Image (cartoon, grey):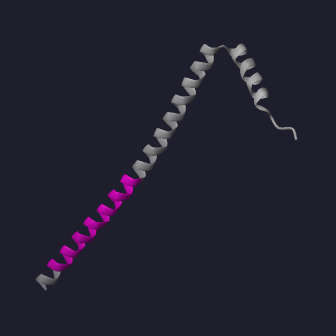
Amino acid sequence: MGGISIWQLVMIAVIVVLLFGTKKLKNLGADLGSSIKGFKKAITDVDDEDKTESKNDVLADTSNTEARVEVDVKEKDKA
């Protein structure tokens, strides 16, 4: 029913190139690509920080548990 054909897309592309020019479109594409790349990097950095914090929390909990066990053993030895 009212779908867009390939020829209509080609005509739209030609009009856009005529209006903006190839150099401006190239710069726009490069800027868009770098911003997407930066966004993806920021997302992975946040994920890495969360994983690192989780590992540090687990390690801190483990060391606290070990310290408590040592204190309990020393208290039992004194008694």
Give the side of residue 48 with respect to residue 68, left or right.
right
Residue interval drawn in magenta: 51-74
Quadrant assignment, res 19: top right
x 45%, y 49%: residue: 47
* Image-based side of 39 in relation to 61, left or right: right
Task: Identify the residue shown where x is 49% and y is 44%.
Answer: 43
What's the residue at 39%, 54% (across, down)?
51
Q: Where in the figure is residue 66, as x and y percent of width and height? A: 23, 70
Closer to us: 43 or 10: 10
Residue placed furthest toward the bottom: 79
Occupied quadrant, residue 13? top right
- For the residue pair 25 and 68, the one nearer the viewer reads as 25
The residue sitting at the left extreme is 78
Quadrant where the image shows the C terminus:
bottom left
Name the main secondary structure of what is drawn in magenta: helix
Q: Is residue 37 above or below residue 78?
A: above
Along the viewing direction, whichever of 43 and 65 lies nearer the viewer: 43
Rendering coords of residue 75 (x, y %): 16, 80
Taking the magenta stretch, the answer to whether it contains residue 75 is no
Q: Is residue 52 above or below residue 2?
A: below
Which residue shows up at 19% across the image and 74% down it?
71
Outermost residue to the right: 1
- Residue 57 in magenta? yes
Foreground pick, 34 / 48:
34
Residue 59, placed above or below residue 24:
below
